[in-house]
Image (cartoon, helix red, strand yellow):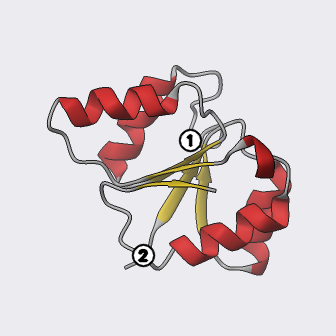
């Protein structure tokens, strides 16, 4: 199983670089997908339509969006939320994404 991560605009840029270039992960940044300054719900729907696992530091909005999605009996491909403790720790974020890349993330929420 190969996971493609979709990183929200607030994910630390160097973490994405490390994860892609050094660890070989597949990552699409929302800005590269044409979703700069886009509503979080639209980003969530895009991720679901395309089978991407969302990676975000937006621990304020995404849990509520996810809860609404699940309450409507929808499945999801996974959400990874970066907590404030590790928000700017690029190497930690990249390592955790590498660990999670081989897991089945469907219907899971991971906090890193």
Where residue 76 appears, as percent x and y from the top left, is: 30, 48
Residue corresponding to mark 1: 33
Residue in view at x 62 percent, y 40 percent: 8
Residue in view at x 83 percent, y 67 percent: 91
Q: Which mark is residue 42?
A: none
Figure check: 36 above or below 93: above
Of the residues under marks 2 and 1, which one precedes in the sequence? 1
Residue in view at x 56 percent, y 41 percent: 33
Where residue 100 appears, as percent x and y from the top left, is: 53, 71
Does dot 1 land on a helix, a strand or a loop? loop
Whole-number angstrom distance, CA of label 2 to CA of label 1: 24 Å
Figure check: 89 above or below 62: below
Q: Is residue 110 left or right of residue 56?
A: left
Q: Is residue 58 left or right of residue 23?
A: left
Q: Quadrant of residue 53?
A: bottom left
Residue corresponding to mark 2: 103
């Amino acid at each position: 199983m190969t996971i493609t991560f979709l990183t929200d605009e607030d994910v630390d840029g160097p973490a994405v670089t490390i994860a892609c270039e050094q660890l070989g992960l597949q990552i699409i940044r929302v800005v590269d997908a044409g979703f700069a300054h886009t509503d979080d719900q639209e980003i969530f729907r895009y991720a679901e339509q395309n089978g991407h696992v969302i990676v975000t530091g937006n621990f304020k909005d995404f849990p509520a969006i996810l809860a609404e999605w699940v309450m409507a009996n929808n499945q999801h491909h996974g959400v990874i939320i970066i907590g404030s403790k590790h928000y700017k720790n690029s190497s930690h974020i990249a390592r955790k994404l590498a660990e999670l890349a081989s897991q089945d993330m469907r219907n899971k929420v991971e906090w890193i």
